[in-house]
Amino acid sequence: MQALTSPSPIKIILAMAFVVACWGYSPSGIHIGLQAYDPVHLALLRFLVASVFMALIALIKGISLPRLRDLPLLFGLGFFAVSLHHVAINFGQQGVSAGASSVLAQSVPLFSTLLARFVFKDNVSPWRWGCVLLGLIGVMIVVAGDRGFGDIDAHGLLILLAALSWSIYFALQKHHCRRYNGLTLVCYTVWSGTALLLVYLPGLSAQVLAAPTHVQLAVLALGLFPSALAYLAWAFVLSHVDLSRATMTLYLVPPTAMAMASVALGERPTLMIFVGALVVLISVLALNLERKPLVMNSTTACDK
């Protein structure tokens, strides 16, 4: 009976590959979108597309209505996962390469550890503190290497703000949102975050009319793939694979993003970015391999 309900390993592997490809595309898609849109309008248009798509999925699958007392929390999730995260990352990518951006996004688990200690007052082992320190060193190498020594651009710090925002989102989701299934939570997070972005609606139509076709297609892809379909595929993976094993596949996102940026944007990451990326990925991998499980397991979507 179990064999009838469990998907084949090939389907799970294909779903993982799809997620990696979608989130690997996101930095390049953002760079292309910024050719015709300012950061706030790009975030709004991307999630208007995602919101419409998620509404269609919700109609097909059916989701429960939120409790009124949960609305502030759901809007908080939308703010950190969508509004703040994507506005910050869009502004950040005005001065950071797609490859570097994808690496900096991997710092989410490091921020989650800091939140666990200083906000939720959890015990953090010396091993985890060492991983955090190593990861932050890698982050600084990437930020400096993207523009050269001594020229640490504030745009890189905005990417880190976006990673911190995602960490807060995962913390809120873990500690407060057990009453909703994955699809329901993703839908309300996307919709609430999009609603908050509507403050930037004035001026969007003019940019839509002026944007060239290749930019429009890139933004449409951003809304459909990294912002919607990838979440559905990731939920499918997590329903059949252990979280710690599944998150290991996300270490493929930065090299995938760099490869896509090389083809789509002609980017050539510097040696320092490769070194910093290796340091960050080693620190996050070591963090996840600790025998004692993390208080807040988190995934990176992002740039997504």
Image (spheres, rainbow, N blue to C red):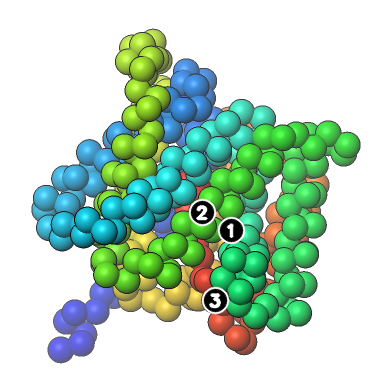
Instruction: Give me the residue at 18% from left, 50% from top.
Output: 57
Question: In the visual, does 1 lie left or right of 77?
Answer: left
Q: Secondary structure at mark 3?
A: loop
Task: Please name which of the two marks, 3 or 1, marks the residue nearer to the observer.
Answer: 3
Q: Residues within 10 Å of mark 1 (few under 14, many from 20)?
A: many
Question: At which x and y percent is residue 232?
Answer: 30, 57
Instruction: Give me the residue at 77% from left, 65% from top.
Output: 133
- Residue type (three-letter) at the residue carrying disc 2: Trp
Question: In the visual, does 222 lie left or right of 152?
Answer: left
| Marking on residue 108 | 1
The mark nearer the N terminus, 3 or 2, is 2
Question: At which x and y percent is residue 104?
Answer: 64, 49
Question: At which x and y percent is residue 102?
Answer: 59, 47
| Marking on residue 166 | 2
| Marking on residue 283 | none
Q: In this orientation, which residue lies closer to the viewer: 187 or 241?
A: 187
Determine if residue 254 is in view: no
Q: Secondary structure at mark 1?
A: helix
Q: In this orientation, which residue lies closer to the viewer: 279 or 75?
A: 75
Determine if residue 171 is in view: yes
The mark nearer the N terminus, 3 or 1, is 1
The residue that disc 3 covers is 295
Q: Residues within 10 Å of mark 3 (few under 14, many from 20)?
A: some
- Residue type (three-letter) at the residue carrying disc 1: Val
Q: Quadrant of residue 67?
A: bottom left
Instruction: Give me the residue at 46% from left, 57% from top.
Output: 169
Question: At which x and y percent is residue 75?
Answer: 35, 48
The mark nearer the N terminus, 1 or 2, is 1
